[in-house]
Image (spheres, rainbow, N blue to C red):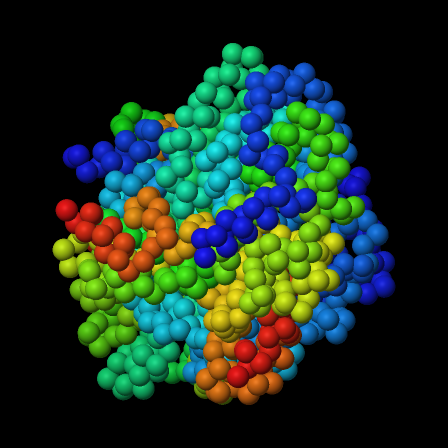
Amino acid sequence: MPEMVNLKINDISVSVEAGSTILDAAKKANIKIPTLCHHEDLCIAGNCRVCVVEQKGVNALKASCATPAEENMEIFTNTNKVREARKTIIGLLLSEHNNDCLHCYKNGNCELQSMAKDYLVDSDKYISILKNYEIDRSSPSIIKDDSKCIRCQRCVRTCAELQDVNALAVSGKGSEMKISTFMEKPMDYVVCTNCGQCVTHCPTGALVEKNYIDEVWDVLNDPSKHVVVQTAPAVRVGLGEAVGLDAGKSYTGKMVTALKMLGFDAVFDTNFSADLTILEEGTELLTRLKDKIENKKDVALPQFTSCSPGWIKYIEHEFPDILDYLSTCKSPQQMLGPLAKTYYAKSMGIDPKDMVVVSIMPCTAKKFEANRPEMYSSGYKDVDYVITTREFGRMIQQAGIDFETLKDSECDSILGKHTGAGVIFGATGGVMEAALRTAYEIITGREVPFSNLEVTPVRGLEGVKEATIKIEGCKAEWKFLENVELKVAVAHGLSNARPLAAQVQNGESPYHFIEIMACPGGCIAGGGQPMPVNNNIRKKRTEAIYNEDESLQLRKSHENPEVKRIYEDFLEKPLGHKSHELLHTTYTKRKKY
Amino acid sequence: MTEINIVKDAVKKHGRKRESLMPVLQEIVKQENYLSEERLMEIAKEFDLSSAEVYGVATFYSFLPVKPMGENVIKVCQTIVCDMKGKEAVLDAIKDKLNIVPGQTSADGKFSLMAVNCIGQCSNAPAMLVNDKPYINLTYENVVKIIDEYQS
Amino acid sequence: MVIDIKEKERKVNSHKKRVNLIFKEHDIDKLIEKVLKTEPEKIIDEIKDSGLRGRGGAGFPTWIKLKGAREAKSDIKYVVCNADEGEPGTFKDREIIEKKAEKILAGMMAVAKAIGAKEGIIYLRAEYNYLIDGLQKKIDVFNKKLEDMKFDFTVFIKSGSGAYVCGEETSLLESLEGKRGEARNKPPYPAQEGYLGKPTVINNVETLVYAALIMLDGAECFKKLGTMSSKGAKVFSVSGDTDIPGIYEIEMGMTLKEFAELFGDSNTKAVQVGGASGFCVPRSKFEETVIGFEGVPTGGSMMLFSDKRSMYNILHNYLEFFVEESCGQCTPCRVGCQQLLKGIESIKAKEKSKKYIDELLELAKNMKITAKCGLGQSVCNPFISIVENFREEIVY
């Protein structure tokens, strides 16, 4: 039994575990206390001070997020003194803030704005001390606008604690204190993975994605362009929130209908290329295993997954010596792009120069990925524009589409079919599970030995997960794997990836295959997904993904009929010549400091 | 080659644990009067910290400048007692001698001027530090003399 | 004029409250031996009995810190000497370091013995870098002495790098750990989780010297001085409009009237007690104001202002100081300081009405109850005391 602490908040008795904060206790008593610097994903900061409360018998107010609940404390969260203090603090924040809300991308979705509204504090309570900041638009993924920053340090803590990247730090002192990159260098120059977690954790408009909504409308309105779109697995479980619905439901059918209404000429599915990825990446793994075990060659094992562009940039910066361990497979987004501009273009008789590929992603790093010089394998830019789930939600709203009432429709052929394996790519552990479903079956001819195909050890929100699968009853050509214990690991959030990468760097990794997703929870909580984000929301989105998988008839990538067809008609075989040309890539060593 | 050794030597002397970061930063400033971009990156590497983090620490402290400084750094106290007792005359003397105001470095690179907060010489105000050395009971005239000494 | 100063000095030195403890010659070896022989609990009891409170400004009872750290379970504990004397108008620690470093070290040793620490760190402000060499020599001798006596305790110097806020004990710890000097949330207090997460006692230079003297001569020598709530004596840094600026050790409990008579003259308009973060007391309140915890507390900074000084300029200078020296992490302090400065400027420039000063007073009061650390909480002391006592000078 944990030690309990009993206190009263607004005369309501509440009992919490020792070590809990006053804020925790208030939550338990269903009392809402406003917060800004507090975020449940992050360590306690206690620096914005809006969460102050009054303790009976104590003159100074207490920051409820940072003060432990104590026995017999009597706390009041709504006294005049508290309200006045909060108004003062909100007024102070507004005085150093760029209050041009109508021009702000976060207008209507800003925690400071909503607090100012609740407390009726206007921007001229104090004299404006807003400084002249230059907006950093250098990154293809993220815009940093210091004039909107309230110095809550959520981004800094996110970048440090969740991602272990530390691209953003607090600099200066006193009135000069701000959030900075190294020497105030542009975001596209510094060690930033473009993961966008800072964006999803920013309470204001100081960090937002670079949006390409107008560019996409322009191509949709251009009759000379054939515009195809692809949507990532996690988009459909976040989209509801982006259009004002509750979290926890997948909207694949409505999403496809909406895309058609927006005017896309063909609606494809990144889930299709996720299935394709499994075939390529699974074959790559089996090849490496064969070279290692049977041919005794010195090959790079474990193999790391390569679907997450935030992870790719991270390893390129932080562990440039182990890039050989990455699967050479492009991410599903970058597989679909060139296939649209070659295979699909050819089948439709469209000149790829007239084709535009738009992808809708839960991710800001994908914007960077699409701009990588390696991503022109179709002869053109393989993916022209990447927009996030949030940008997509805005397009739906701009188009006046009543999303909730839409009927379902299906993706277009020939890059639109998917299996449950493709669907689960959106959650941490999903790529691993999908790969095991296929690989095990290829090797043994039997289904992966988990109940209902569900590789539960790799599911869930634990930072690093691992599983061991003993391979038995191999087919003749895979005999070298007989009785091999396949060891796999899954990590999400780059700070969880670091120890696994370090093991590999030191030659101490016990694993054969490692899945990494840059964002905590995987793509379902990617940097391009709706806000807010927390573990409760992560769980709901994850559940929606697994429900969709379970509801599908086909749940193994190699059973995808369009994947089968593309190998017959175009690619020939996994890791074949065409695959190498279009679906595989190389990596770049980058500087760490 | 010799350049890299400055940081490596400092790390050898003070260690590479996080709590040794300040002594190392101080050591580099002692030798080069400021922390250049390259030094900050080298230090980050030695301490296995991000360069942004090291930059953030350095910019917190007034005595760890990240912009180039002259050979001699003059730190004139601007806080209340020195302010009352003739800080302006000190700054005037420096302006007249070196043509610099706080935040600037003389054209010949010999002097930088900083206005700093209380240096604990209030009973002998106005006061300043040149590099680490305190000069007290300043007047226009003796500041001119002090600068002359550093110039020769 | 010269005669006047001599006369003033004579008067101060012969004043009945003038004492000489800190700078007196003491037998350091005897002191060390005495500490070695005294049981930890006895050290804490003796300090408790003396009524010694922190001499850095905050005035926290010293024995409570010691008891807390003694009871904290840890193999590793630290003693930190806070020599980050940054409060405007304070320079007494500098003089103690220059002249009586051995007593500081003996005080650290007593604390180490009391709590069971093996390492001591002197956090010396960067502005006193020129003292390092001299201090280090004395530390070397001291460390060697303790080694010879088989007492496991070693003292090191760590330098600051120019940040007023690092005088706040948790900011100091952050700085020692190689980080930005941003105050921590309390609890936990340093006595439980301090330097590198280990129990740590942080004491001001002067506090440590008094602790040493109390060890040597017993609590009585200290507690017989001062008043009920302010025991002992205190080293004052006297500066500003006075003919005899300098360091003076004086018994606690002197009224400002006595003080101004000794150090000021008929033109003394106000005394700033406790530095920029302290209180400004106008002449009209000298008589009723006692220097001490029952009246105006001070870390020793006493700045006299004559009637030719503009209180607006003084307040302006303080606020500029706080705008720069706030660590910047918490909203009330970072933005509040800027607003107070901008506010009085705007009133002076007639861009804001005189009534805006009331908004600023409210702001200052809110800063006191919402700021994260002592810095932000104390900005209201000079602001309110100056505005309330010299309102006309600020708003016209």
| The N terminus of chain C: image quadrant | bottom left
Image position of C109 (left or right of A131): right
Residue A508: x and y, percent?
A: 40, 28
Q: Residue furthest front?
A: C3
Q: Quadrant of residue A578?
A: bottom left
Image position of A398 (left or right of A92): left
Name the residue at 38% across, 43% down: B49
Residue C376: x and y, percent?
A: 58, 60
| Visible residue check, residue C249 | yes
Q: Is residue C285 above or below residue B57?
A: below
Q: Which of the pair A127/C125 is nearer the observer?
A: C125
Image position of A555 (left or right of A334): right
Q: Is residue C323 above or below residue A22?
A: below
| Visible residue check, residue A331 | no
Q: Is residue A563 above or below residue C266?
A: above
Q: Quadrant of residue C48?
A: top right
Q: Which of the pair B130/A16 is nearer the observer?
A: B130
Name the residue at 67% across, 45% down: C17
Name the residue at 71% across, 69% down: A82
Residue C382: x and y, percent?
A: 59, 65
Name the residue at 68% across, 30% down: C214
Q: Which of the pair B69/B43 is nearer the observer?
A: B69
Q: Which of the pair A262/B117 is nearer the observer?
A: B117
